[in-house]
Structures are given as C-alpha cells and as structure tokens.
Amino acid sequence: QVQLVESGGGLVQPGGSLRLSCAASGFTFSEYAMTWYRSAPGKERELVAAITSAGGSTNYADSVKGRFTISRDNAKNTVYLQMNSPKPKDTAVYYCNARRSRPSERNYWGRGTQVTVSS
C-alpha cells in the first residue's frame, strides 16, 4: 500500500523556522523525484521545491529561494522541507508528491500538513 505521510506542520512565527517531513512507504522511494507543493485558500496549488531521485538536483519557486531547502534521505525513505524565515504568505497546506516516468508513469500524493505563519 502506497503511503506518503506529511508531518511537522503547525503554527510558526514570521522569521522562525519549521521542518516538514514526508515519510514514504509501499514503493521504491529512490526511484522517484519528490516535490513539495502548497495550496492556499483561493489560490492554485503551486510547486514549492523539488528534488531528483538521487538528490543531485533541486528546484525552487522564486518565492522561497534562499529561505527553504528541500532534502531527502533515501535510506529513511523520507523527504524534508526546511522552512527558514517563513512569511505570512507561506501559510498553506503543504503536500508531498512522488513521481517517476520510467519504467512506467507513477504519481502519488500525501494528504497534506497545514502550515500557518502568524505572530
């Protein structure tokens, strides 16, 4: 059974820090690129950060560059999102996504974790 379980969300003050985790099970984690997305009320879901299957390459939304860091531990089947200096506009539900294109297309989603940035 495929599972992606996000954790670490909650209330954080502007300028603080928070680390999200996404624990994967039920598939070969090291074969999948991992991406964090977020969805805020009234806005479309947007890509926050992505990392390749081996962790050699990352990509970030312009709005989080220099503040957020994505990383993964293939031995622990876990991907992380370190959020430093969060801003109120970062408030959203954060989702973990796993995707591969070879040998067959697969795309999995977690249920999300709420992050609220407020003083």
Image: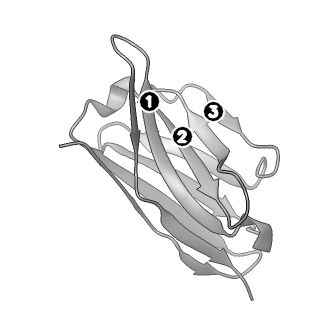
User: Which amino acid, by three-letter code, is at mark 1?
Assistant: Arg
Write the residue at 78% across / 50% down: 66
User: Which amino acid, by three-letter code, is at mark 2?
Assistant: Thr
Residue 58 numbered tag: 3
Badge 2 vs badge 1, beta-carbon distance below 8 Å: yes
Q: Is residue 98 positioned above or below 103 on the image?
A: below
SS of the residue under disc 1 = strand
Q: Residues within 10 Å of mark 3 (few under 14, many from 20)?
A: some
Most extreme residue toward the bottom is 119
Write the residue at 31% across / 42% down: 77
- Give residue 109's position: percent from left, percent from top: 41, 45
Q: CA distance from mark 2 to mark 3?
A: 9 Å
Q: CA distance from mark 2 to mark 1?
A: 8 Å
- Give residue 98's position: percent from left, percent from top: 43, 36
Q: Is residue 102 positioned above or below 7 on the image?
A: above
Q: Write down the quadrant of residue 108 in the picture.
A: top left
- Which residue is under mark 2? 35
Left or right: 12 in relation to 114: right
SS of the residue under disc 3 = strand
- Which residue is under mark 1? 99
Q: CA distance from mark 1 to mark 3?
A: 14 Å
Which image quarter holds the N terminus? top left
Q: Earlier in the sequence, mark 1 or mark 3?
A: 3
